[in-house]
Image (tube, helix red, strand yellow):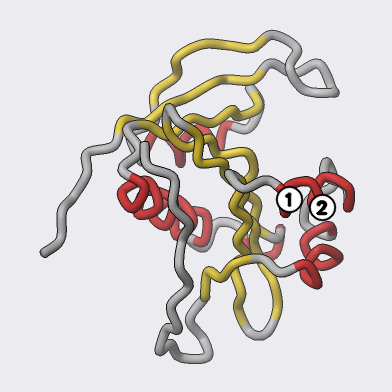
Amino acid sequence: MQLKRLKVVKLNVQENNPIIRPMRFEDIDDVLELIEEWSREIFIEEFKNHFSYNFVLWLHNEIIGFINFWVVPDGIELNNITIHKNFRGKGYGKLFLEFLIKVANFFRADKIFLEVREDNIIAQNLYKKFGFQEIYIRKKYYSNFKDAIVMEKSIKWSIKK
């Protein structure tokens, strides 16, 4: 897979529409409020990695979501996706997954991989709706000794003329 960077384009959107934009260093504190498992140091490392991408979901002048993924030779690894608790169940996770599939198409990635906690049934169901399939279990993967379900989705590239 050819390594290339995403380019940011300015979107003509209305104020009430959510925007997915690249995360900036100054966004770390806001995103840390969404993700308890990550630290400032983890974000700094992710910013340094050339294969790591961090985006936020921006709505009404605030960050309501975050996604981190890696573009690696065998596909895309989704490391984290989260939506602020007050905005869950409103389709914003779906927006991130649609975005991620477009990213996979951009990079000509064949697959997207992810891990999801065994007790996160809502996320599992969302991933299944997008065609992700369980490929194996990582026993006691999380710090609370919960298992991780590893899922993958095969990508069919679309070619636009």
Q: Neighbour class for label 2 at 10 Å: few (<14), some, many (≥20)? A: few
Q: Secondary structure at mark 2?
A: helix
| Quarter residue 153 falls in | top left
* Tag shown at residue 139: none
Left or right of 38 on screen, residue 66: left
Please state which of residues 129 and 69 is positioned toward the viewer in this rendering.
Answer: 69
Q: Is residue 27 above or below residue 142?
A: below
Left or right of 59 on screen, residue 124: left
Q: Neighbour class for label 1 at 10 Å: few (<14), some, many (≥20)? A: few
Give the quarter of the figure containing the N terminus. top left
Q: Is label 2 in contact with label 1 (beta carbons under 8 Å)?
A: yes
Left or right of 158 on screen, residue 88: right
Q: Position of residue 132 (x, y in %)?
A: 39, 31
Residue hosting label 2: 44
Q: Position of residue 8 (x, y in %)?
A: 48, 72
Instruction: Tell me which residue sits at (59%, 67%) in the image.
Output: 22
Q: Position of residue 59 (x, y in %)?
A: 60, 78
Cα distance in 3D space between marks 2 and 1 = 6 Å
Which is in the foreground here, disc 2 or disc 1? 1
* Tag shown at residue 48: 1
